[in-house]
Image (cartoon, rainbow, N blue to C red):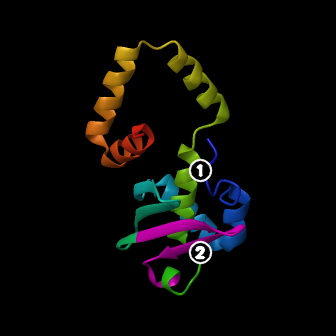
Amino acid sequence: MDLPFAHVLHLERIRELADGITFERGERYFREKRVTELLRREGSLWGTVSGSSSYRVRIWSKGDGLAYRCSCPVGKDGAFCKHCVALSLQWLQQTPRTEDLDELRTALDSCERNLLVAFLLETAEEDVLFTRRLLRRLRP
């Protein structure tokens, strides 16, 4: 699965964008599970990170780099803040590995159609974004 910003959102880039202290604080927020929401929508990551308040974060690709915005005071000044770091690390942690996708592909190839349809409908009931994406793919 090739993500639109996978080539620019990686650990080395995150370390380049954040100074050492900011990276450490963001990493701590990530470990403390302060990322309370994370969505990938329209080529962007959107999320909420809890700190002294709840902060909204958006990260997207811009050319060969990343663009980002956070509602915290540091982020409003244009810096890649600890909330951006935490959200980025959360994304990297949950992005599927190639081996996992290969295993999934093999399992889907042998899956009974009825079981797969039931699972897709169940997931669609729980996730409106998934429902919309699935409908876009299935419509002629």
What amino acid type should be assigned to the residue bearing mark 2? Phe
Q: Position of residue 63 (x, y in %)?
A: 69, 69
Q: Where 72 sits versus 116, above or below?
A: below
In the image, is residue 69 part of the stretch drawn in magenta? yes
Q: Position of residue 5 (x, y in %)?
A: 63, 58
What amino acid type should be assigned to the residue bearing mark 1? Leu
Residue 72 left/right relative to 64: left
Which quarter shows the N terminus? Answer: top right
SS for callout 2: loop
Q: Residues within 10 Å of mark 2 (few under 14, many from 20)?
A: many
Say which residue appears at 31% left-offset and 38% top-offset. Answer: 124
Say which residue appears at 57% left-offset and 44% top-offset. Answer: 95
Q: Give the overall secondary structure of the magenta segment.
A: strand
Say which residue appears at 69% left-offset and 57% top-offset. Answer: 11
Give the magenta-colored segment's residue range. Answer: 56-74
Q: Nearer the viewer, residue 65 or 53?
A: 65
CA gap, disc 2 and disc 1: 16 Å
Q: Position of residue 101 (x, y in %)?
A: 60, 30
Which quarter shows the C terminus? Answer: top left
Residue furthest to the left: 125
Residue 122 left/right relative to 93: left
Q: Position of residue 91 (x, y in %)?
A: 54, 52
SS for callout 1: helix
Say which residue appears at 66% left-offset and 34% top-offset. Answer: 98
Total of numbered circles in the picture? 2
Residue 53 left/right relative to 102: left
N-term-proximal mark, 2 vs 1: 2
Q: Where 73 sits versus 40, above or below?
A: below
Q: Nearer the viewer, residue 89 or 41?
A: 41
Location of mark 1 (residue): 92
Quadrant of residue 39 within the rendered picture: bottom left
Location of mark 2 (residue): 80
